Image: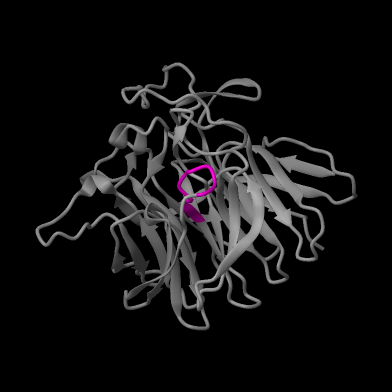
């Protein structure tokens, strides 16, 4: 039995396992990376609503607390604010309602925080270096002082830390590349992924490190295809995959195939792999560039990606059959495994924009789900 709490969808399973999915925070503006702090609080990156320019950016990193112990994180304190954000529809005319800004976030044992930020709208300064696309750090609580680690020229959607070599690994999605970054900001490319079988960009969107041997797991989203029978579609169904990459040699192989929009991946100490598919099925109709994204009375529109078809799946380390842990999620984007539970960010897109859900008209709502009960 899979039991869902917090308004998610219930689903039967053939064994006696009880999996609980609970909404532990809601009303967020594009939640992305989540880290669990030693005392159980959450550190959450929110990209924003996509409407703000750099000088009044709405991207935030906040500390979430469960003030009364009921499982819902109602207290939210600012750690860092005002990072620029943008919407890819209005900025680039992509046909999809996608918000960019703050991305992945990790917390080290010594309290340091690293995160990615993306904001092409910030442009360039006099020395020619883009200030909005970067790997950044925060000093430990309570200072939360931001510092620059490495400025890049392409979006980074994922980040992971290697404690053995004191390295950061990043998925440079805009370059279809995975790179290693020293704490001092020296960047070395490890692997570049070519276009996939149907001609679409591979787009490394998620990253995890196998603690057993140091391998990297890379989620290849399977991005835009411009030659599909003369049209442009956002992704190719069942073409996404999880890659196992040796960061020392750069050699890789397909670990899991047949996924759709694989947007993130994580792994636990036993080797069980957890994948997130942002959506399944065929792409939805594209949006016109002038669609009124911020109009709360605008007609419902999927925004280029089918809504409420996201999925979280566990691939057991023993090679057993995959187990769907949660289905029917609305545009999940990030996943974090911690102490027997998964934390999943959902609700990508313009917050509050009307869409059609399983029960009719609803609105895009950024939330964090906690999934537990799937392992002994």
Q: In screen coordinates, is 33 left or right of 276?
A: left
Q: Is residue 352 above or below residue 65?
A: above
Question: Does residue 314 appear left or right of residue 150 in this picture?
Answer: right
Residue 318 visible in the shown view? yes
User: Which quadrant would residue 62 be assigned to in this image?
Assistant: bottom left
**Quadrant of residue 270 within the rendered picture:** bottom right
Q: Is residue 48 above or below residue 116?
A: above
Residue 361 position, x and y percent, is 56, 19
Q: Out of 4 and 142, give the one closest to the viewer.
A: 4
Q: Which quadrant: the N terminus?
A: top right
Q: Nearer the viewer, residue 37 or 188?
A: 188
Which residues make up the magenta segment?
196-205
Residue 53 in percent (x, y) is at: 24, 41
Query: Which quadrant of the figure contains the C terminus?
Result: bottom right
Near-viewer residue (62 or 369): 369
Q: Which residue is rendered at x = 59% and y = 38% of the image?
A: 237
Rendered view: 301 above or below 108? above
Q: Is residue 16 left or right of residue 169?
A: right
Task: Name the magenta segment's main secondary structure.
Answer: loop
The answer, for residue 336, to whether it is visible in the render is no
Residue drawn where x is 77% and y is 55% of the image: 373
The picture places residue 30, in percent across and down from the top left corner, at 45, 43
| Residue at far bottom of view | 164
x, y percentage for residue 319? 79, 62
Q: Residue furthest left?
A: 126
Residue at image point 11% right, 62% down: 127
Query: At 36% from the left edge and 26% from the top edge, which residue is drawn?
Result: 294
């Amino acid at each position: 039995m899979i039991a869902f709490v917090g308004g998610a969808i219930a689903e039967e399973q053939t064994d006696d396992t009880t999996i609980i999915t609970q909404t532990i925070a809601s009303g967020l503006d594009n939640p992305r990376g989540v880290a669990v702090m030693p005392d159980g609080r959450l550190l959450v990156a929110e990209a924003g609503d996509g409407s703000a320019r750099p000088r009044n950016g709405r991207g935030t990193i906040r500390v979430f607390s469960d003030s009364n112990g009921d499982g819902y994180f109602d207290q939210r304190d600012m750690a860092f604010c005002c990072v620029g954000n943008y919407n890819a529809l209005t900025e680039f005319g992509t046909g999809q309602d996608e918000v960019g800004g703050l991305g992945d976030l990790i917390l080290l044992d010594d309290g340091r925080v690293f995160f990615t930020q993306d904001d092409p709208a910030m442009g360039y300064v006099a020395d020619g270096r883009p200030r909005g696309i970067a790997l950044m750090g925060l000093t430990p609580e309570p200072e939360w002082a931001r510092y620059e680690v490495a400025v890049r020229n392409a979006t980074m959607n994922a980040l992971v830390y290697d404690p053995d070599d004191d390295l950061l690994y990043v998925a440079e999605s805009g370059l279809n590349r995975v790179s290693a970054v020293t704490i001092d900001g020296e960047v070395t490319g490890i692997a570049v992924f070519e276009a996939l079988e149907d001609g679409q960009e591979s787009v490394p969107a998620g990253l995890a490190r196998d603690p057993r041997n140091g391998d990297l797991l890379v989620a290849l989203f399977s991005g835009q295809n411009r030659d599909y029978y003369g049209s442009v579609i956002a992704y190719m169904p069942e073409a996404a995959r999880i890659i196992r990459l040796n960061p020392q040699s750069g050699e890789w192989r397909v670990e899991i195939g047949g996924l759709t929009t694989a947007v993130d991946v994580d792994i636990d100490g036993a080797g069980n792999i957890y994948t997130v598919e942002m959506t399944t099925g065929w792409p939805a109709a594209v949006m016109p560039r002038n669609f009124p994204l911020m109009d709360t009375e605008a007609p419902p529109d999927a925004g280029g990606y089918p809504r409420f078809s996201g999925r979280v799946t566990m691939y057991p380390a023993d090679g057993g059959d995959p187990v769907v842990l949660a289905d029917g999620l609305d545009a999940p984007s990030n996943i974090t495994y911690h102490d027997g539970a998964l934390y999943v960010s959902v609700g990508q897109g313009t917050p509050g924009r009307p869409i059609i859900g399983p029960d009719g008209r609803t609105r895009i709502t950024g939330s964090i789900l906690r999934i537990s009960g799937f392992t002994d």
